[in-house]
Image (cartoon, rainbow, N blue to C red):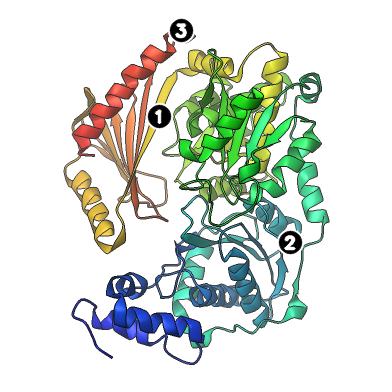
Amino acid sequence: MEKTEKVSPETIRKAEAWLRPQVDGQTQDEVRRLLLEDHDTLTESFYGELEFGTGGLRGIMGVGTMRMNRYTVGMATQGLANYILKNRPDSPSVAIAYDSRNQSSFFAQTAADVLSANGIRVFLFEELRPTPLLSFAVRYLNCTAGIVVTASHNPKEYNGYKVYWEDGAQVLPPHDKGIINEVRAVAGIGEVKFEGNPKLIQSPPQEVETSYLDQVNSLIHAKAEIAAAQDLSIVFTPIHGAGITLVPKALNRAGFRHVHIVESQAEPDGNFPTVVSPNPEEKEALHLALLVADEVNADLLMGNDPDADRVGVAIRNPQGQMALLSGNQAGSILIWYELMQWKKQDRLTGTQYIASTIVTSELFPAIASHFGVPCYKTLTGFKYIAGIIREMEGRGTFVAGGEESYGYLVGEFVRDKDAVISSVKFAEIAAWCKTNGKLMWDLLMEIYVECGLYYDELLSITRKGISGMKEIDEMMYRYRIEPPTTLAGSNVVEVVDIQESFSLNVLSGERNPLDLPKSNVLQFILADGSRVSVRPSGTEPKIKFYFSFCGTLKDPSEYRARVESMKSRVQKSKLELGV
């Protein structure tokens, strides 16, 4: 077979290793085609190994060691099985759920087969279900671990595989590194036990879902207000994902009777035909829902990502227009409302707390301070918030928490961000506001007046392929060796390098250690309290810039002018950072 100079010998070796009997004929035919005809795709598919990271797998679907397919999923699952059998050998079990993405059910079945072939009992959901239900099921069924097959909000070409441990949270140290090492120790496809044992695979009992919905309903504070706001109009879109299976049901159980589902996006479909990307962070993904909201004069709009752990929100502004909230704004409303209700019920006893991440708005801790509760901040990724909940068990009560990326949680019975809970809570807040003669927008303005005005903006830059990853690495290196001294007219007074575990006081030159796990994140803190954070994505070929500018708001009438001023500062900062 002709070897081209464009393809490295190692890439060709990896590809030819897939021309063996343990690989199915269709896959072998595609590998041969790539070797002969498509060297660019061959390189992208075989230049390395699809990395099993601390959160699991995520990648483009297709043949090759760098793609999501039966063999990469099988090897990852074999490594997980080996780790479970070494560390939890007594009657181990794993719960598995999946979303609407192409091949999600196939990958879920593949994982179930490999686990059962290794003597591990499997609870495999028969149909797609939201990620938070899997988190709940792991705890409810006393499972050793859990798996969700999803690529969250990524484009349709992607799929992924997230691993949960017995506490219902995504794996953290020491289990994450332990699983990674076992996955890397699987030398090849031939070591994977693909022939499943059907006797060890069963569906979770129906009581899992019923109990979960009961728990969701137990979180509601304003039952009287919901009953009084019978004309509250809600638009919901699952964006072709798993949210359709539980969110309408949960809203109905909570007492909301006017829920308008965006029918063109109601059917689960891994091609996501009505959107460019099924990401509720992006306005385009909610375009159809916004049209429906205007048609029915909705008070509230909510949209989930494919695995229903994130929710985008739009509300009416004083001009009667639907306004999309940022993740920080929606999370702030949710946390304010929860703490307000706990205070009203005299439940704030000194042991309650909230949690957020280092790139989430500083408004979260400002709200916590207003109510006299601590806010614990941790690394990006909801698994770290779940880790705080686990650490605080028996010592404190988690009220609520969230990330700027539209993921929130209320209560402790789920250990991941939960769009089912969040959707019910946002509907409750809308009902509470309506019966109290105000808009949710008015509530947001009240929060800004009481706790400070925070404007947050995310810039996400994609750089695909090997060259793109190199460019991202070079950007981070440059910011480390030559951090900015000023941004948007304000001096940089502190540089936080979480990868190197120190905080530098620019004025004094003093370095202080950080009490956080290492992560490739830089933060530039400005003299006025504003901050800019830079973080390469851990799951996508992206680098993200989080701009957070703060000030005061004396009156809601000043809001738009103050925000425009902050937007100008963000634009100036982008130019100064070269992005």
Which label was assigned to residue 142?
2
Q: Residue at x 65, y 46 (%)?
A: 266
Between the residue at mark 3 and the residue at mark 1, the CA separation in whole angstroms equals 19 Å
Residue at which label 1 appears? 456
Most distant residue in the left direction: 482
Q: Residue at x 59, y 29 (%)?
A: 335
Whether residue 396 can be seen here: no
For the residue pair 144 and 305, the one nearer the viewer reads as 305
The quarter of the rendered structure image containing the C terminus is top left
The residue under label 3 is which amino acid type? Answer: Ser
Q: Is residue 503 above or below residue 76?
A: above
As drawn, is 226 to the left or to the right of 380? right
Q: Residue at x 80, y 43 (%)?
A: 214
Q: Is residue 202 above or below residue 378?
A: below
The residue under label 1 is which amino acid type? Answer: Asp
The residue under label 2 is which amino acid type? Answer: Asn
Residue at which label 3 appears? 557
Image position, residue 434 (x, y; %) = 69, 17
Dot 2: within a 10 Å radius of its alpha carbon, few (fewer than 14), some, or many (20 or more) residues? some
